[in-house]
Image: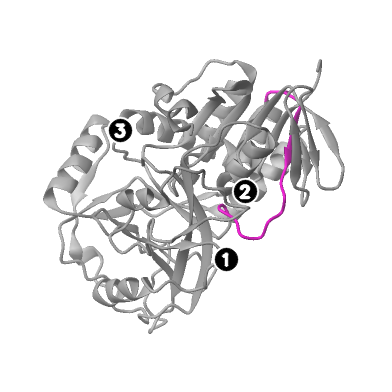
Amino acid sequence: EQGAPVVVVGGGVMGAAACHSLSARGVPCVLIDDGYPFKSSWGESRVCREVQEEAVYMGLIKRALELWRSLEGDINDKLLLHTGIITIGEAKVLDVVKDNNKLLNLEYETLDRTKYPHLTIKEDAIYQSGGWAVLASKAVETLYTLGAQKGGVIIENDEVVKVNRKEKWVETASGTRVAYSKLILSCGPKTNKILQTAELSPLAIVPTAEQQNYYKLKDASVDYSTDSLPIIIEISDKYFYVVPHIKGGVEGVKVSLHAAGEVLSDSEYVIPKGVDPQQVYKHYSKHAARNVVTTGLPVERLPNVEFVNEWVKGHLPHLVPKPHYTYRCVYTSSVKGDGPALGPHPEDPNVIMCCAFGGTGFKFAPAYGEIAGNYATGAAQEVQGLERFLPDRLIV
């Protein structure tokens, strides 16, 4: 075991961030990814907002922004495009957002609709400067590249099929065997499959297939890019979000429902016995699909896209209210809706869980990767309040 690396299983943004963080400290690290095409971390963009509802997330976003800026310095390029953010919601919801802005000494203002004549927002809304579009695929690629430059070993397109916790090694489908000192599992919806292989108790987490929709402009003279359109989120029982057009990226504007997809349950996406997958919908959008797919991947377009089309028609009048492009990604969520599984598995302190971020983790990824690395090395945690995310509470 002496000199054995930390092995990270799962090469989405969390695994890539953990590998980068460890490699940057000079800790030997091997990242193994199966190359499965139906991913959680792909696509061109994600939402990042500075204000958060709870203290632990305020600490996480502060640290994550520091690390994002450090990564941008390393590559001398942008990974976050500043847009500002418009938050739509009922008065009581916006009051909470305002209070949290005050706690963080962040500025906000009641939305001045005259600044955005290309929008139709009749609901209560506020504007905050602290909003960014994260360049998602570019961020993952950057973490891979920098992690490898700093000494990380990356094994791609090779699935972990065996975990021997007694002898502390993993084996891949190609027959490659890698010894480990600590094992970080950042395998998202495949977490319980790997836990089965490792003969560890599974977690009460549920994967869902979410859909992102892109809408074309009716009139090319209207600017719906990150230069003039803020990110928009509607905090309600529906929860819509809008990411402006990324210049040079996918045509159009991304408008989607947050947490509204079908549950996935098969040999790859294992939901433990005794866990009711429908529980996850207590924390999902009012317009969630509410069905379970057990035979491969779901159809490309969710029926609930009609609700998105209506929202687009009412709020973004210069867009064609029908998506011209859609794609799927996977959320993995705690059935309790109480945050990720982050920390040592209670049955083996050498196995670190880093999963179940519920579709809201990408913006925090550099911080989560650092935290997983700290658990693996015994380093002190900079972010406070992480005890609430320990995996013990989700063991089945």
Query: Is residue 74 in view from this perspective?
Result: no
Contact? badges 3 and 2 (CB < 8 Å): no
Going from N to C along the chain, the mark reached first, 3 or 1, is 3
The residue that label 3 is drawn on is 54
Q: Is residue 32 magenta?
A: yes
Q: Secondary structure at mark 1?
A: loop
Q: Position of residue 196 (x, y in %)?
A: 64, 38
Query: Is residue 268 in view from this perspective?
Result: yes
Task: Say left or right for 74 vs 176.
Answer: left
| Secondary structure mostly taken by the magenta-highlighted segment of the chain | loop
Q: Quadrant of the N terminus?
A: top right
Q: Which numbered disc, 3 or 1, marks the residue closer to the eye?
A: 1
Going from N to C along the chain, the mark reached first, 3 or 2, is 3
Q: Secondary structure at mark 3?
A: loop
Task: Say left or right for 30 vs 103.
Answer: right
Instruction: Residue type at mark 3: give it.
Output: Glu
Q: Secondary structure at mark 2?
A: helix
Contact? badges 3 and 1 (CB < 8 Å): no
Q: Is residue 219 above or below residue 301?
A: below
State the residue at coordinates (37%, 82%): 320
The residue that label 2 is drawn on is 140
- Structural distance between the alpha carbons of marks 3 and 1: 35 Å
- Structural distance between the alpha carbons of marks 2 and 1: 24 Å
Instruction: Residue type at mark 2: give it.
Output: Val
Residue span colored magenta? 25-41
The residue that label 1 is drawn on is 297
Q: Which numbered disc, 2 or 1, marks the residue closer to the eye?
A: 1
